[in-house]
Each structure stands twice: as C-alpha cells, then as structure tokens.
Image (tube, grey):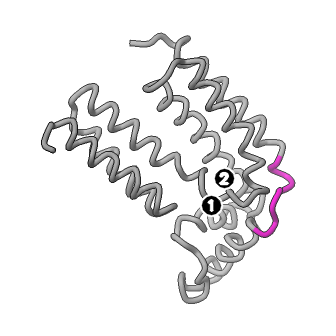
Amino acid sequence: MKSMGSTGLPVLGIALLSLAWESLFVHHGLNAVDEGWPLYAAQTLHAGGVLYRDAFFVFPPGHVLPALIGAWLDAPGLIAARLVYAGFNVALCIALYLLGRRFMSAPAALLGAAMLAVAAPDSHGAHYLFGYRYLVFSTLALLCFAERLRSGNPRYLIAGGALLGLQVVFRLTPGLAAGAGIGLGILAAQRSL
C-alpha cells in the first residue's frame, strides 16, 4: 500500500497545477469557433429543439452536455461550460498520473501529467478541444482493468464497463479502442488465446 506522500501529494500537485493553468482561460476563450457550436446546440436543445433535427452537428451527444449544463446554470453558459471543460481537463491529468504510475516511475508519470496540464490550453486553440479531455473515462476504465488484474475482483470490470459506456457517449473512438484493448487483455490474462 502506498503512503499518502507517494501518491496523494503528486495528485494534489497535478490538480493544483492544472487548476491554475485552466483558470487563466476561464474568462476568455482561446477558440470561439469551437466554443460556439456546442453552445449553439445547447441553447437550441434548451429552447425545446430536438437533437439531430434542430442541432444536427452534435456527435456524439456528450459533446454538447457541458455547454448544456453551462446554459442551465448561467445562460448563455459560456463561463460555466468552460468550468465544466476545465473539470474534465483536471480529472484527465489526475487519471493519467494514476495510470502512468502503473507502468512507469513516479517522476515520469508526474512529468507526463504535468505536461498534459500545461498543454491543455494550447489544445483549445489548435482544435484538439473535444478530443482528449473526454479520455478521462477511458483512462479510468483502464485503471479499473489494471485493478481487476491486480486484485482479481470482477467488480472492477463492471465499473470499467460503465466508464466505457460513458466514454462512448462523449467520444466514440477512444471508448471502442479502450474496450477492445481491455477485451484482449482479459483474453490474454485468462490464457484463452
């Protein structure tokens, strides 16, 4: 069992670094085009529109969820949506560190998570906006699978499957890739190949 200092302090540091970096961009966005289309879709749905009829460019539906939450909380929702997006980014940095600790040394995992934390705003301007922040669900599913392998407890696969289901709502390809990887990992772990 790892002590609080071996895992807790780096996680806290990554969270604070990512929060600090994300806070620089909450009140002014870096990419109005990328922010505008989910916000428009959210406002259309909030006004009674039908998904894929009135807001047809939302793929998959989870893309519009942060903007919809933002519009519900504080219309028109731009700042609130940015806060939700920032939450996804912070969660991904923490999850990446925890996953990295399974495969590499603590300093290397910390460096990878810190690099992701400071690269997040650059990704907004480079149109990577909706791709990587939702990888948090796949990353957590992989952590569940790793814990299943470590402990042998099949409940972790149920949690991992639920996380993959969430992943598919937000972004299809990472969920399918992680699901295929976990499936192959299960086969390999059981020596059923």
Vertical position of residue 64 compared to residue 118: above or below: below
Helix, strand or loop at mark 1: helix
Q: Quarter of the image containing the N terminus?
A: top left
- Residue lying at 40% horizontally and 36% vertically, measured from the top left: 143
Q: Quarter of the image containing the C terminus?
A: top left
What amino acid is at disc 1? Pro
Outermost right residue: 28
Q: Residues within 10 Å of mark 2 (few under 14, many from 20)?
A: many
- Residue lying at 47% horizontally and 42% vertically, measured from the top left: 139
Outermost bottom residue: 53
Vertical position of residue 169 compared to residue 14: above or below: below
Vertical position of residue 30 compared to residue 64: above or below: above
* Quadrant assignment, res 47: bottom right
Instruction: Examine the structure image and report whether residue 105 is included in the region drawn in magenta.
Output: no
Q: Which mark is residue 92?
A: none
- Residue lying at 43% horizontally and 61% vertically, measured from the top left: 168
Mark 1 sits on what residue?
66
Instruction: Examine the structure image and report whether residue 31 is included in the region drawn in magenta.
Output: yes
Q: Which mark is residue 85?
A: 2
Give the spatial CA distance, label 2 vs label 1.
7 Å
- Magenta part of the chain: 25-33
Q: Is 141 placed left or right of 112 in the picture?
A: left
Q: Are marks 2 and 1 in contact (CB under 8 Å)?
A: yes
What amino acid is at disc 2? Tyr
